[in-house]
Each structure stands twice: as C-alpha cells, then as structure tokens.
Amino acid sequence: MRELLAGVCAEFKRISSNEGARTTMVVAVLIYAVFYPQPYLNETVRKVPVVVVDQDHSATSRDLIRRIDASDGAAVIAAARDVSTARDSLLAGRASAIVVIPADFERDILAGRPSPIATYGDAGYFLIYRAAVGAIGAAAQSVGAGIAVHRLSVQGVEPATALAMVDPMPVTLVPLFNPQGGYATYVVPTAFVLILQQTLLMGIGILGPAPPQRAGGRTLGSQAIGVLARALAFVALYLPFAILYLVIMPYLYHLPRLGAVGDLLTVMVVFLFAVSVLGLTLAALMPSGESVILMLVVLGVPLFFLSGVSWPTESMPRSLSMIAQGIPSIPAMNAAVRIGQMGASLADVSSELRSLALDAGAYFLAAVVCQSVRDRR
Amino acid sequence: MKPQSGVKPGLLLVLRRELRWMRRRPAMPIMTLGFPLLVFVLLAAVFNTGLPTHLPVAVLDQDRSTLSRQIVQAVDASPDVAVAERVDDLAGGRRLILAGRVYAVVMIPANLERDVTTGRRPTLVVFYNNEFLTVGSLVSRALGDALGTAEAGVALAARLKQGESRQTALAAITPIPVQISPLFNPTMNYVYFLLVALIPTVLQIFICVTSAYSVSLERRSTVGLVILSRLGGGLAPAIMGKLLPYTLAFLTTLCLADAVLFGGLGTPFRGDWRLLLLADVLFILAYQMIGALFALIGRDTVQALGFAGLLTAPSFGYIGVSFPSLAMGSFPQFWGDLLPASWYMHLRIEQTLKGVAPAYSFENLAALAMILAAVTALTVLRLLSLRRARLLAAGQGEEVVP
C-alpha cells in the first residue's frame, strides 16, 4: 500500500517536472474546453437565405412568401425575375434555396385544382437543406390547409368537421432529448470524451515508459503495483477535467444535462483508468513520445465517427463496431451522452460499462507485460 | 555533412539529402502514405453501407384495430426504419430508447379507428431520440412521411366514400404540392459529401504534423538549419528542397484516395479535375508551410506538434461542412476563414460533387493562394530572425562552424 502511494506521488512529480506533459495534460485540456465547441454553440441552423421567383403576383402567392419569410428555418432575401437569375445567386453561394411560384397559381387553387410550387435546394449541406425545405413545405402545407378548410366551410361544412376531413389523424413528432435539435448538444459532450482520451494518451506517451526499476524490484507483482500507481495518478489528475468537461462546461454552454452526476463519474473513473493503462501500454510499445503524438493526433476524426453517436452503429460493419469496443472512448462516449444528456441510469448503460471494464482489465495486463518486456531488454 | 566537393549547392542537393533521410526514418513513409490510406479505408468502412436503413423503432399499439395494424405495416414498409420491438406502455419504450436499442417509439392511441371514423381527430405521437441528431432526423422524417401517408389514405378514403371523384379528392388533400428538387445531390446521399470532406480533413492533420515534425528535427541539431541553407545555396532552394518530397508524397496519397473515392466507390465527379489538382497542390503546400512555421516557433518537437494538433485536429467544425458557417458566431466564422482547409473544401465540393462552372470557384482558389503566400512570408521572416539570432550568438565576425 505504501509502495502504491509512493508511486502515485512520484508520478505527480514526473508530470509537474515535464513541461511537454504538463502542457498536454493541463493547458491543452483547458484550451480545448473553450476552443473546440465554438463552431457549434449557435446550436441550430436558422433563417437560411431563400430567393423567390413569383410569377403569379397574387394575394395567395404573397401570403405564401410571407409565411416562408416568417418561418424559423428560412428567410426570403430577394425576389428574382426568372429562374436563371435565381439559380445564379444559388451558384454564387448567396442563397441556398429557390422557390418558384408559377403563373396561375392562385387561379388553379380557386378552381380546386392542385396548384404545385417548385423548390430547388442546395442539397450539398444537409442541415441547410433540411431547414430550408422544411420551412417551405410547412408554409405550403399551412396555406393549403387554410384553403381546404375554407373551401369546405363555403360548401356549408362546419369548421370542426372540415378540419376532421382535412386532417383526420394528425401526427405529432416529439423529440425526447435535445428538443431544439441543437448541434452542440449532439456533438460537444461526445467530442469532449474523445478529447479527454486523446490528451491523456498523448501526455502518457510524452512521459514515456517507467524508468527501469532497481535490480531487486523486477517481480511481476511490483511491476503491477507500478502500473497501478501510475494509472491511479492519471485518473486522479483527469477526474476534475472530466467534471469540467461533462458537468461544468455543458452548464456554461447551456446544454441540456439530465443524468445523475454520480453515475457519470462512475463511468468516467472506469474510462479514465482504461485509458491510462492503454496509454502505459502504448508508451511501452512505441519508440518515442513524438511517435505516440503523431499516431494519436490523426486518429481523432475516425474515432469520432466510430462512436455510433454521429453515425449509427447499425449501419457499420459488425466486425468494425465490435473491434471499436476495445477503444475506451467508444463505449464511454455512448455512455456519457446517454447518462448526461438523456438521463439514463447505470443499468441502461451496463453493456458499455462492461466493455470499459474489459478494456481496463485487458490493457492493465498488457501494460504490465509490455513494461516488463521493455525492462528486460 | 559538408557539401561534397564537385557537387554544386542547390535545390537538388537538399532534395537528395531529404530523400536519403526519409528512407532512414520509417515514420516518414508511414505518415505520408501508409497511415493516411489506412485511415481513409477505416472511414470508408464506417460509411460503407451508405445512408442508414432499417433503423430500429418500437411500436406501442393501444388500439389493435385494422387501421392500427395498417399503420404499423406502413411504418415497417419504410426503408429507413424497421419495427424492431413492440411495447406495452410508454415506460417500456423509454427504457428501450435509453438502452440504445431503438431510436423512436410510435404511439397509436386506444380507440384510434373509432375516433377517426367519428371525426374526433385522434393524434399519432412519435417520440424519437433527437440527441443522436443524424439518426434522430432520419427517423423522424421517415416516420413523419409514413404516418403522413397513412393519414392521407384515411382522408382520401373518407372523401371517396362521400362520392368525390379520386382526382378532386386528391387535389383537396394537398392543394399546394411542393415539387422538391435537391440540387447537386439528387440521390440525397450525404455519405458522398462526408467522405469527400473527410479525406482532406484527415489529410491536413497528417500534412501539418508531419511537416512540423520533420522541420523540428532539423532544428533539434544546433546546426541543422545552417547546413540546410548552405546545401541549398540560399533560403528558397533550401525550403523547397526540404518540403518538395513531402508535397509529392501527399499529392500521391490524395490522388490515390480520390481515385478510389470517385472511381471505385462510385462517388459522382462533375467538376474540372485540373482546377482541383491545382487546389490540391496549394492546399498541401499551405499546410506544409504552417507545419514548418510551427516547428520554427515551437520550443521543441512536442510543442510544435501541439500547435499543429491544436490547429488541425478540431478544424472539421470550423470548416463548416457538418454545421454550416452561416449559422456560426463571428469568432468561428473568422477562424474558419483563416484555415486553408475551408477554402479548399468549398472548391473541392464545387469541383467534384456539384459540378459548378470553374469561374465560381476562382474566389476560393485565390483565397487559398493568398493564405499560402502569407504563411510563406511568415516562415521566411521567422527563418531570417532565427539566423540573425544565431549569428549574434556565435559572435560578430566569427565563422559559424557547420
């Protein structure tokens, strides 16, 4: 026990005396907490610029345009004379969608014929396209429903009955979590877990493998205590960062936070331990601290997409998602978001916890073995 | 390592030295060719199946009528979702969502069929997991469409029963149909866009850190930079000779990846390849220069790599492909405009997937060139100031010992 405590203290001393490790494991962690989320903080795409081509110039067409402009998703920035002018502003990137209201739009409606409008949207950017097309479709539907109800009431149908004929079985879509569909809510907590892992692994890589022990102390048992001590020091250093990343920063950024902090920290302790022993394994295997950094810095993007949060695990090759469970960030990202943002309990994330515990055990053994082999050489 | 007698200092000499040096260090071929291609393969495997289909949803059917069974069938028939579970109450559905087993619960209220026929307008409610935004929007759109179609079917049947003609009834249900044409992406397959964007996003990290690494190793030996400029017979050939082998290696990697993406994976290519190739070169050079600059500013290799990582690793967000720039605040917009990757990405998407006339892309190309020029100027200034500092340190008039 005393050996363990001494090991933990020694590790803290090593971290504080190594400038590279200190920068990576403290300064970089603090910078990323502020720098990383900036692009996403506005949460939703609003007021996508739309150009309208109104060839009808009627009261109904103007009503439709007004409703599109008043919507949350789109804003009418200009009226173009013809489709080619409108297309030009789309190609030049000034507008993201075009609405064409054909001549005789109102006349067809009054005659009871379907009166279509056309929308061209820049489908290259998913969120922009969805916001614009959603807003235009909703405006057309609400103008259309008004007309349909009006027509029926002209025929003498009672308003309530008319509504039941137009909309007999309304559908309500209720977002259970992240109600405003915010991008930061979706991306930031997940990415934060990954940043914790990457900076910790890099920091351990910079610190390097443990210096070879005294001649007497080379038993596997003392090697295990050495690895355990170092890992505990890293967990102790990073636990406050985990609280900063998953509790304090979401609060400051006004991200929804539902789950119990205790549950979140339980997951984080197992996760940080698994990452620490993985880091010690890498440090013993790789030739230098720089090579650890080079390897990890480029893996951030694929690791993010492997998590199953941004892209569903169901549509990945099964073998790939199984292997991915061996990287601590992947079950941890899932568990952290489900507890933090969705209010899940530890029981709901039991399979992720199991993966994390397996990772922790496996990498602990690997770290002990790799360190022993390295010492013997 | 003195210049051999009989060999004139110049670009070629630096180039040869760099190539010899690259052969001795396995990290270099790995970081310029093998590893990036491996990461691309990994990403392609993640997005291998295209848009997600058959995403699992649960159904809570409290009516168990002919109509409710039709609705469940309509949901299951949608290619995007699949009814994976049936639950008896909402609490059960919520548990499945929290455990990550389904992405939505469709609630069909009791007495649905009776209420529909008597005109009481019962509501179908879909609870969906919007925390996982991509899946949430796919699932909610698919369910909204499927249930909307089911509703239209009910409305149509009611009107046909009243003796309206089919045509009149259809016109009455949707008086203003919206004909939607998704431009540039007719199949609405965002996987193409993701992969087209992710390749340079990953590559800029490789380029920047590799370049920072190789230049900072040069700095590590006290005489490295001096030798380099002696061998080159001047600053410009020395820098060019040092960077050129990597430019070619990364260009090869990028072209290989693009050949697979547009050739093998069937991603549509509608642009001008010459313009794209020109932009590729500027993009690679810009990140090499940035990496070199970090190496000249950083105290040591670790710090140089730290700068390079900080600039490139979180840049996917700032580039504005996932979350668009137009919705960002002013700081991320400004920062994104400073990144060569943002301009390159616009041009790349325009000249591959969109097939926009080259004239529309010149602005992006010009911005890319301007950033490259600015970073090059900063790098040269930094080199000059380092040289002056070294000369001062060596003492006036004394020859600097190579």
Image (cartoon, rainbow, N blue to C red):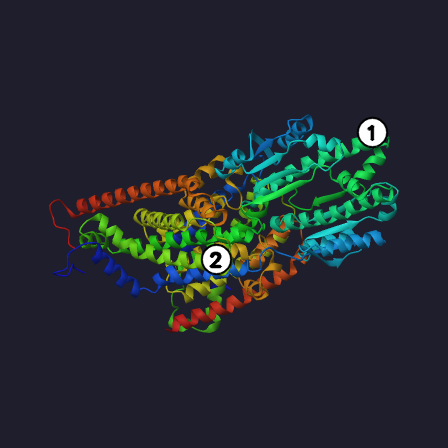
Residue B80 in the image: state x and y as whole percent: 66, 54
Considering depth in this image, is A217 or B53 the residue closer to the camera?
B53
Residue B43 in the image: state x and y as whole percent: 50, 58
- For the residues labelled 1 and 2, say whether their Cβ atoms are less than 8 Å apart: no
Considering depth in this image, is B181 or B261 the residue closer to the camera?
B181
Residue A182 seen in render: no
Q: Chain of mark 1?
A: A
Q: Amino acid at mark 2?
A: Leu
Report how far apart the C-alphas of labels 1 and 2 lie in the structure. 58 Å
Q: With B313 as the anchor, is A358 left or right in this view?
A: right
Q: Chain of mark 2?
A: B
Residue, disc 2: B261
Q: Is residue B80 above or below residue A35?
A: below
Number of labelled discs? 2
Circle 2: is it few (<14), some (14-19), or many (20+) Cα within 10 Å?
Answer: many
Residue at the image position 85 percent from the left and 40 percent from the top: B120
Circle 1: is it few (<14), some (14-19), or many (20+) Cα within 10 Å?
Answer: few
Label 1: which secondary element: helix
User: From the viewer's perspective, is the residue at label 1 or at label 2 nearer?
Assistant: 1
Q: With A116 as the anchor, is B320 left or right in this view?
A: left
Residue A136 in the image: state x and y as whole percent: 64, 37
Considering depth in this image, is A212 or A297 the residue closer to the camera?
A297
Q: Is residue A353 above or below residue B201?
A: below
Residue, disc 1: A154
